[in-house]
Amino acid sequence: MVNDFDLLTSLPDRDKRAGYVEAVKVALIRDPAFFNEIERNADKLAAFDAEAMQRLIYRSAELHMNHIATSGDPFEFGSARPLDFGHWAAHKLEQISDYRIRHGEAVAIGIALDTLYSRAMGYIDTVSCERILSLLEHLGFELFANELLHEDSEGEFVVLKGLEEFREHLGGKLTVTLLQGVGRGFEVHEMDALIVLAAIRELHDRHTHRVSRLAAEA
């Protein structure tokens, strides 16, 4: 694996930021100490500090490679794909938006959605949930997109079709990674659509309140 840090200087801020979410993702499922480090460096990362970005990329790549080397399924032929945390909704959001939403931006929303779902199911505590959402926002991610509310001709939320498509992507058995805590990912094989929809509404309300607060502070 080769990381050319000079490439970062050629990227717009939006694309630099989009890459951050892969580091947050792997920290959430494998390394609580790395998540704590990202929190500590959030101000520097939000300002695109070169040293902080290089450290983030190095550790993220290291964790991804360690997972691939030790999971026993380096080419992901099986059903267990924890590195796809947050991706079932992300893939669908990209499609719905005609790829207006960058992959990293969609994954940030997907992580927020699955984190709220984990909290609603009692898998993760409220404090940890808020830490995750707040960090993503601090790094500059929007945690809601109007595409989450798009409906098909039958009045069904289109994003929920992402679960069935994800099942097909995995070869017929749904396997979604959720959180039992910061740095502790685990797998479930079904998702309650009503709880997913409640999480979407919560993201919408959170986004609305945040926009109003920022406008009042401006």
Image (spheres, rainbow, N blue to C red):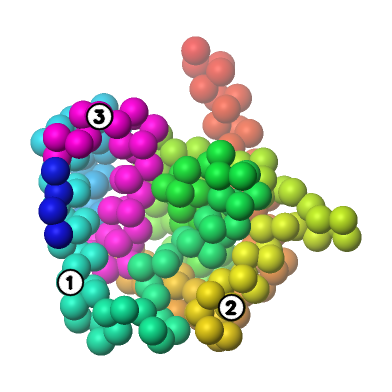
Residue at 36 percent of width and 79 percent of height = 76
Circle 3 residue:
10
For marks 2 and 3, give the CA distance. 37 Å
Mark 3 residue element:
helix
Q: Amino acid at mark 1?
A: Asn
Circle 1 residue:
66
Q: Mark 2 or mark 3, which has the lower sequence index?
A: 3
Circle 2 residue:
168
Q: Does residue 116 appear to the left or right of 125 in the view shown?
A: right
Residue that protrudes farthest toward the top in the picture:
218
Q: Amino acid at mark 2?
A: Glu
Per the rendered image, the range of residues in magenta is: 5-33
Asked if one can make out residue 127 in the rendered structure from this viewpoint, the answer is: no
Q: Position of residue 160 (x, y in %)?
A: 68, 63
Closer-to-camera residue (99/184): 99
* Crowd rating for badge 2 (residues with CA inside 10 Å; few <14, some 14–19, many 20+): few
Mark 1 residue element:
helix
Residue at 30 percent of width and 62 percent of height = 26
Residue at 35 percent of width and 58 percent of height = 25
Tell me the mark number nearer the camera, choosing from 1 and 3.
Answer: 3
Q: Does residue 12 appear to the left or right of 41 in the view shown?
A: right
For marks 1 and 2, give the CA distance. 27 Å
